[in-house]
Structures are given as C-alpha cells and as structure tokens.
Amino acid sequence: MIRARELVKHFRVHKRPPGFASALRSLVRRRYETVKAVDGVTFSIERGERVGFLGPNGAGKTTTLKVLAGLLHPTSGEVEVDGFVPFRRQTELLERITLVMGQKSQLIWDLPPSETYALNRAVFDVPDAQFRQTLDELTELLELAPLLDKPTRQLSLGERMKCELAAALLHRPTTLFLDEPTIGLDVAMQLAIRDFVRSYNQRHEATVLLTSHYMDDVVALCPRIIVIDHGVLIHDGDLKGLVKTMDPDKRVSFTIVDPIAGDALAKLGTVLARDGHRLTLRVPERELPGVVGHLLGPLHVADLAIEDPPLEEILRVMFGKAREGEANGAAAVDATPPPGKRAEADRAEEEAGT
Amino acid sequence: MVRYLRLVLVQLRISAAAGMAYRADFIIEGVMAVAWMALTLLPLLVLYDQRSAVAGWDRSSALVVIAYFLGVRAVLEGVVSPSLVDLVERIRSGAFDYVLLKPVDAQALISASRFEPWKIFDLLGALALVIYAFHARGGPPSATGLAVGALLFVNGVLAMYAVWILCAAAAFWVVRLDNLTYLLGAIFDVARWPIHVFRGLWRMVFTFVIPVAVMTTFPAMALLDDLDARTAIATLAGTAALLVVSRLVWRTAIRSYTSASS
C-alpha cells in the first residue's frame, strides 16, 4: 500500500546565464531558484496494483519515486509505504521495496553479476536456501543462465538490464518502483522485461509503480495510469477513461483501392495522415458505423482498422494544454520534450489547434 | 553485528576478485606497493645519515614513527581512501541511491565498499620495521608499551577515518571533492615525522586540527614507553569526540543528498 498526500518536493538550484562573465559573477553572487519538482501530489495505490506513472521530462516522476523509496526527504506532505515513512529508512521497509533505475547501475562493473548478487545477499541477509530458490526462479524467468558468470562490462545493454532486475529482486520485495526499466532496449527485450514484471507481480502480489517513455510498456502492463505534469497530478484512473475523456474520437485507417475525392473524405472525418494509398481519419465515435459502412460499401477501401488514439498523442495534447496553462501564469519547470519528440509535439499541437 | 561482519568479508572477497580482474594491473600494483615502502624510508635514512638525533628522536625511534605511518597509511590507502573515493564518485553520478536503498547503515556499507588487497604488504612491512627498530634498540618493547601502542594504532586509524569521513561528507554539498582528498593525503604525509619536529602553530595544527600526531607520534611514544597516561587518555578522548562529530556531520550530510538526475 502506497499513499502520498499533498506531497511537495522543491529543489533550490543555482542559475546563471551562459558566458564567461556570468560564470565569474556567479563566483561572487549566486542566483538561486526554487524548482517545484513535485507540487502537491495526492494518490494511493493498493497492494498488488500495477500503476503507470506518466509525464514529460522534468514532470516530477522520478522525484516522486525517489521520495517514495526514501532517497529524498519531501519538502512537505505525507508519504507512506506499507505503513512506513520512507525517508526514515527503516530496515523493515527497505527489505520490502526496490527501485530499479534504467539509467543507473548497481552491478559491479568488472565482475560477473553473480558477485553483485552475493553482495546483495549479504546486505539483505537472505537465508541461503531462499537465495538459491529466488535466484533459480529469476534465472529461469529472465533467462540469465549464460550471463551470470560474464563480467558486467561485457554484457549488452539488454542483458545488463535483466541482470539489474534480478539484483533488485533477490530479496523478494513486494513493492517495485521501476524507473524507465526498458530504456534503450530493443523490442524483444522490452517484451521480455514486460512479461517478467507482470509475472513477478502475479506471483508475489507485488505492487508495481512504473515510469516509462515507451507507451507500449504502460499500455501492456498498467491497468491504471497516473499522469503528472509540472509536479501536479493531472489524471489518475484507468487507461480507457483517460482516452475517453481526452479524445473520444476513433482513428480509422484504410487503404484506398479506387481514387476518392478530397471533399468526400472531408465529409467522413479529419484526415490525420496520408502515406501513399494509406489514410488515417479521425472520426467521432457516434458517426463510426455510418463512416465504416460508407468506406466498405461505395468507396471500396481495403485493410480497414479502427483504433483508439495512441496514448502518446493523448499525452502530447494533455501536456500541451498544461503548457498553455503555464503561459497564463502557472509555476515554471522545464517540461520541454526531448529533441526527437519536439517536432511530433509541435505537430500534435497544430492538430489539436493549440 | 554478524550481518556486518559477513558483509565486510564478502566485500573483501569481491574487492580482491575485482583487483585480479585485470592481470597486468594486479602485478603492477604489487610491485608498486614494495617500491612505495622503500621510497617512504628513503628521506629518513638520508636525514639520519648526517646526524644521530632530530628533535630528540634517534634513528630507531624515528623508524617506529615511520612504521606507524606505514601502518596507518596502509589502512588509509587499502580501505578508507578507495571506499571514500568511491563514495564521492557515487554521489556525483547518483549511484549512491543504491547505497541508501540497502537495509544497512549507509556509512558502514560505504566505508568498506572498496579494498586494495595489496596494501596488506605495507602493513606487513610496517610490522617488520617495528621489529627491526626494536632489534636496533637492543630489546623488545614492554608488555604495557605493546598493549597501549596497539590500542593507539587502532585509535590512530579511527582518528584518520573520522577526518576522512568529515571530508567525504562535504561531497554531499560540494560534489567535486577530488582535490580535497589529495590535499588531505598530502597533509597526512606529515605524519611520517615525529610531531616534535614541528614548532609553534604547526605543532598545534597537527595535534588538534588535523591530528596526525594522534595517528603516529603518540602511538610510537606509547610503544617506546615514552607516553604519559594523561596524553594517552586525551588521545583516546580526542578520537572519540572526532568520531562522534564525524557521525553527526555524516547524518546531516545524508539529509542533504539530492540524488543526481535520472
């Protein structure tokens, strides 16, 4: 059970403009700014739930996870994990939780993962029989056998991530904080990690709080989604609810067999994408039967597919609205999308008319 | 307690294994350990080649100070320094998160996180030097001298450890600390000379501010049956105070940990 009530975490950061002169000035007089990383977030998660934690870069996801794991002291508000206050770092709590960070490693670089496991066994004081059993189970689920005795530095990114997961789970935690566990992994490895997390959750009735930039991870794993932006919670509920509230229109994709006039298409819905003969329309749900009937009937289209709008698109619109709110006077933190995403975000904003 | 002992043993084994991961490095480290010990003795031998005593210390007594210096340095370079350099690096990179996530005391865990197994030769060299020095003096130390000398060696190591913890704790606020650890290393080098070589302000600094006298001169004097009870007790009390202060600073420092970005 995880509870956060009016959780606030502010950081005081040193700010200076670029350039040598300002670097010199900052030696004498420093300007500080308070960054509101998390600004009054409230939620509660029951045991055994799998919850996706979403938000743009700098939204406060990782900070929240770190506060929940006891790494950071909250500025104000209340946090509770399994009845413990995390930042007190009580042994009983630390033995029940784990935090996996896709961008940080706890494996000993020059030695095989089995040495890190031996160290963690000593640290968590895991009895010999339980350690063997857990390691066997993790080895089977994650297919670790060929990796255990290879030096960490010789493992691929995906192999290392699997070993990281095992290192984090050897003490059989019942609360898992997973921060970008699939970052940089190929599709097959992402699937393997996803399957593993689901299986671990079911076997041990473990609570999972997951952040990921890959929406597929979240869609596949998490029935419930918490969306945070600029440190503020903007959605807490199931995925379908989020989609319905934000964008109830469906996406209808099809391949044109015979030419269709532009105005005929415009009557059916908004054209979102056109790639040769393949088209994607945005169609309001209530008009769907008529549009589909028309496409399959008089217009003779092929390969027709009806889908919900992609989660990425929904979130881009949500964060775009939040930025609009910010321009109207809200607090400031950097929520700029990564460079690769910027063009897409701009496009989405255009589409959404923002 | 058993948990911590088992943990230290596992870390010792892992550090030895990590040291042996690169074969050439392992051999070079071994040769370097022997060479450094010889170089440490050189200034002393050169000095006493010209005179029989310096600041009231004859050659064999000064060798005992050097032996303590080698001993404390072996622990410093073998355990404390690698672990704390590791700590500074972990704070900078954010990997210290994983230390705080463990259900053991973070200071204990980090203080023994890295070992340089080759430094055991420095420790053995220090012991050999003590034996040689007492052989040159014409007899073994007294039982009391041996007991107090051994106790003050442990005390000296703890004093040095406390100073290093204080220094490392600063890494939670200033992040880049490499130069400070080099500076402390250079200051510690002073401990190879008996404190009486220094006068006035420097003697005060090296006794009370950066207590190198507590690490080498006083233990050597105890072994030589030349330390009064009052100084011995003050030495122990001073170290205890230093350890308490370092622990308090460490705990405050941990609260300031902001964790590097994801």
Image (cartoon, coloured by chain):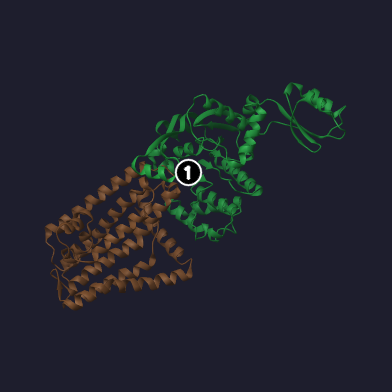
* Amino acid type assigned to the residue bearing label 1 in the image: Ser
Shade representing chain B: brown
In the image, is residue B183 above or below residue B31?
above
Lateral position of residue B53 relative to residue A167, left or right: left
Q: Nearer the viewer, residue A248 or A30?
A: A30
Q: To which residue does mark 1 refer?
A: B261
Which chain is represented by green in the image?
A: A
- Percent position of residue A335, x then y: 53, 35
Name which quarter of the figure residue B196 lies in.
Answer: bottom left
Lateral position of residue A61 relative to residue B187, left or right: right
Lateral position of residue A249 relative to residue B33, left or right: right
Q: Residue at x 54, y 25 (%)?
A: A325
- Percent position of residue A162, x then y: 57, 51
Name which quarter of the figure residue B198 lies in.
Answer: bottom left
- Percent position of residue A176, x then y: 52, 41
In the image, is residue A79 above or below residue B86?
above
Q: Name the element at disc 1.
A: loop
Note whether residue B55 is visible. yes
Query: The disc numbered 1 marks a residue on which chain?
Result: B
Note whether residue B105 is visible. no
Name which quarter of the figure residue B42 lies in.
Answer: bottom left
Q: Nearer the viewer, residue B238 or A339?
A: A339
Q: Nearer the viewer, residue B105 or A154?
A: A154
Lateral position of residue A15 relative to residue A284, left or right: left
